[in-house]
Image (cartoon, rainbow, N blue to C red):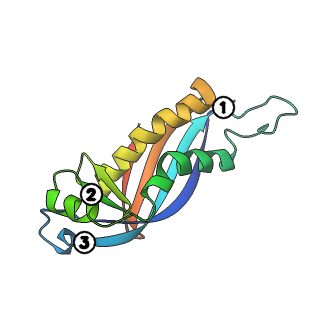
C-alpha cells in the first residue's frame, strides 16, 4: 500500500510586527492566518477500528494542532523577544495575550516554528507511522510560507 498524505486547514487571528522592516509591516498590525498541516503515513487497515481507512482522523489532526499551537497563537500578539519596547508595552496591558518568540514573526519564521512545535506532537501521538511533511502558513490569501521536512 502506498504512503498517503492528508492535509488539515485551520485559521486563526493574530497580530505582529516586523521591527526593522522597510515598509508598513514595521507597524503593529494583524492577519487572518491559515495553517495547513500535511501528514503522511500508511492507511490504517485494522478492521473494526474507528480510524480504519484513514491515515489519521481529521478531527484528531485538528485537536492536536489546536492544543499545541492554534489556541496559543489565536487572538494573541506574536512579538519578537528582541523587540523590547513592544514586548514591554504589551506586557503592561492587563490580561493581554502576548506570545514572545525567539525570532522575528515573519511568515517564514512562524511556519518553521509551527513545524517544530507540531512535529513532535504528531510523532508522539501515533508513533512512527505518522510523519509531519509540511506546514504551510498563509499570512494573507496571496502570501504564504512552507516549512517542509
Toward the right, the furthest residue is: 48
Any mark on residue 100, and which? Answer: none
**Pointer 1 local density, CA inside 10 Å: few below 14, some 14–19, many at least 20:** some
Q: Is residue 15 left or right of residue 10?
A: left
Whether label 1 touches label 2, CB < 8 Å: no
Quadrant containing the C terminus in the rendered view = top left
Identify whether 6 is placed above or below 23.
above
Quadrant containing the N terminus in the rendered view = top right
Task: Name the residue that disc number 1 marks.
Answer: 42
- Whether residue 105 is visible here, answered yes or no, is no
Distance, label 1 to label 3, CA atoms, is 43 Å
Instruction: Say which label, 3 or 2, has the lower sequence index.
Output: 3
**Pointer 2 local density, CA inside 10 Å: few below 14, some 14–19, many at least 20:** many
Considering the numbered disc 2 on the image, is that residue within a helix, a strand or a loop?
Answer: strand
- Residue at x-position 55% and y-position 51%: 66
Considering the numbered disc 1 on the image, is that residue within a helix, a strand or a loop?
Answer: loop
- Whether residue 66 is visible here, answered yes or no, is yes
Task: Name the residue that disc number 2 marks.
Answer: 79
x and y percent of residue 129 in the render? 61, 27
Task: Name the residue that disc number 3 marks.
Answer: 28
Instruction: Say which label, 1 or 3, has the lower sequence index.
Output: 3
Amino acid at each position: 500500500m502506498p504512503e498517503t498524505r492528508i492535509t488539515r486547514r485551520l485559521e486563526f487571528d493574530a497580530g505582529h510586527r516586523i521591527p526593522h522592516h522597510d515598509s508598513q509591516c514595521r507597524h503593529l498590525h494583524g492577519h487572518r492566518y491559515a495553517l495547513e498541516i500535511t501528514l503522511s503515513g500508511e492507511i490504517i487497515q485494522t478492521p473494526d477500528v474507528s480510524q480504519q481507512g484513514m491515515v489519521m482522523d481529521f478531527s484528531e489532526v485538528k485537536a492536536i494542532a489546536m492544543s499545541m499551537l492554534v489556541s496559543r497563537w489565536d487572538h494573541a500578539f506574536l512579538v519578537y523577544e528582541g523587540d523590547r519596547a513592544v514586548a514591554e508595552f504589551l506586557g503592561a496591558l492587563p490580561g493581554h495575550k502576548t506570545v514572545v518568540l525567539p525570532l522575528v514573526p515573519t511568515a517564514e519564521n512562524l511556519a518553521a516554528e509551527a513545524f517544530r512545535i507540531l512535529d513532535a506532537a504528531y510523532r508522539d501521538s501515533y508513533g512512527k507511522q505518522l510523519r509531519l511533511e509540511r506546514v504551510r502558513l498563509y499570512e494573507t490569501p496571496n502570501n504564504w510560507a512552507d516549512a517542509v521536512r
